[in-house]
Amino acid sequence: MSTPIPTRSLGTTGPRVSALGLGCMGMSALYGKADRTESIATIHAALDAGITLLDTGDYYAMGHNELLVGEALRTASAGSREHAVVSVKFGALRDPDGRGLGYDGRPAAVKTFAAYSLQRLGVDHIDIYRLGRLDSEVPIEETVGAIAELIEAGHVRHVGLSEVGAETIRRAAATAPIADLQIEYSLISRGIEERILPTLRELGIGVTAYGVLSRGLISGHFTADRKLDAGDFRSLSPRFQGDNLRHNLDLVERLRSLADAKSVSVAQLAIAWVLSRGEDIVPLIGSRTRARLSESLGALDVTLDARTLAAIEEAVPPDAAAGARYNEAQSAMLDSER
């Protein structure tokens, strides 16, 4: 990357952040073993490069990821640390073996989760705070209202949402200003385009898009014979199974020919496509190493003209992917899919 990282606003009420954010989950959970030293070095490199948005969750490896991000912030250069914007998801319940027990959006739980996150992160406030998945037993107004009270008390700066549908977005926005919705969005995950994205734009709410490389599937680095570590989320993901995987990797090869023509990587092309979808969208890159971070940052130098965008759409049209983005049990928790 040869130029400073541009910035984008998270909606009309949220903070201005770097046009790419760093999703830190994979440094602790769901994608196999990660190197702690390299993870912290990658966060430092991201901050030094001008990335300001760091995304984590209190349930990523049961607090491990927040502790990791907190350590990285404490040891980062003062100049980069002061510009960091920390986004935190909360609410997922786990037993000691890591099994999911649902989500808790009750006001008392919201405030308790926040207290623990502030301690683990070692910060005096959380910039954006969001329930990881909708708690079907608690009205969204109560959950958002509790975050609004945390804002009034100075512990949180902005309300965020995660994986909720248009109706829930409207109810939340009627309760308090919403900075952004965090939701999966990529070339092969385009479900938000029909109802959710228009609703967000009507209400002035931004998007932080996770899964822009579909958990590495469309990075150009994943192969059909790759052996996944025990506990790797992708071993249970429908898109990484059997014929689905082979079909999806064929889509990647179509992208590779377009990327080669522009002398960029497949990952850079895929990230650039998400960047091109609007100034109100901030892609989260899940780089776990400095090498992958450097590659992802290169997407900011990729310009997609109308002809290239049309060729990408032809190569990977909407609904081209085989398999759902989550398995049946996890999909049942997605208000965004209803």
Image (cartoon, grey):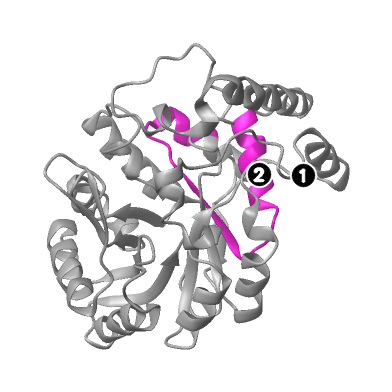
- Magenta highlight on residue 148: no
Secondary-structure class at tag 1: loop
Residue under the image location 44 percent in, 28 percent down: 291
Hey, which residue is sitting farthest top in the picture?
Answer: 225
- Left or right relative to 136: residue 336: right
User: Over which residues does the magenta segment extend?
Assistant: 266-295
- The one nearer the camera, 7 or 237, is 237
Q: Is residue 261 visible?
A: yes
Q: Contact (CB < 8 A) between labels 1 and 2?
A: yes
Identify residue type, mark 1.
Leu
Whether 91 is drawn above or below 253: the answer is below
- Magenta highlight on residue 275: yes
The residue identified by callout 2 is 272
Secondary-structure class at tag 2: helix
Q: Is residue 17 visible?
A: no
Hey, which residue is sitting farthest right in the picture?
Answer: 307
Residue under the image location 51 percent in, 33 percent down: 238
Residue under the image location 11 percent in, 44 percent down: 96
Whether 171 is drawn above or below 57: the answer is below
Identify residue type, mark 2.
Ala
- Residue 304: mark: 1
